Image (cartoon, helix red, strand yellow):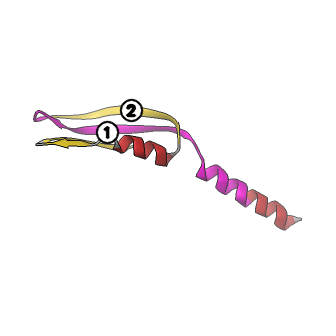
Amino acid sequence: MKKMILAVAVIGGITMLASCKKDHVCSCSGTILGIPFSGVDTTYTDMTKKEATTECDKNDASVGTDNIDCELK
């Protein structure tokens, strides 16, 4: 009986950690037309960290000397 309770607790814990959805903040900085900027934040709500990272990385860009780099905080 103790083994069964332990197994259920471990499986439940892993499931909760693997699918934990919460808010994540994506922060972007870089240069546009030679003017540096930073601290442009976007909040992604109710997403896993992997989903938020994918969305945040879509904002990365580079054209000539201009660039935008975004990372999760």
**Magenta stretch?**
10-35
Residue 64 image point, x, y percent: 11, 43
Residue 42 badge: 2
Magenta stretch contains residue 23: yes
Regarding mark 1 in the picture, which secondary structure is present there?
Answer: loop
Residue under numbered circle 1: 59
Q: Please state, as top left, top right, bottom left or bottom right, where the N terminus lies in the image.
A: bottom right
Magenta stretch contains residue 53: no
How crowded is the residue under tag 1: few (<14 C-alpha within 10 Å), some, or many (20+)? some
- Classify residue 32 as left or right of residue 9: left
Q: Please state, as top left, top right, bottom left or bottom right, where the C terminus lies in the image.
A: top left
Residue 28 image point, x, y percent: 30, 38
Q: Is residue 3 above or below residue 28?
A: below
3D distance between C-alphas at marks 2 and 1:
10 Å
Residue 26 image point, x, y percent: 38, 38
Residue 27 image point, x, y percent: 34, 38
| Mark 2: amino acid | Thr
Residue 48 badge: none
Q: Quadrant of residue 41?
A: top left
Dots 2, 1 in contact, CB < 8 A = yes
Please give the name of the residue rendered at 60% of the width and 48% of the height, measured from the top-left corner. 19
Please give the name of the residue rendered at 11% of the width and 33% of the height, measured from the top-left corner. 33
- Classify residue 55 as left or right of residue 3: left
Please give the name of the residue rendered at 78% of the width and 63% of the height, measured from the top-left corner. 6
N-term-proximal mark, 2 vs 1 = 2
Q: Quadrant of residue 30?
A: top left
Regarding mark 2 in the picture, which secondary structure is present there?
Answer: strand
Please give the name of the residue rendered at 45% of the width and 42% of the height, measured from the top-left corner. 52
| Mark 1: amino acid | Asn
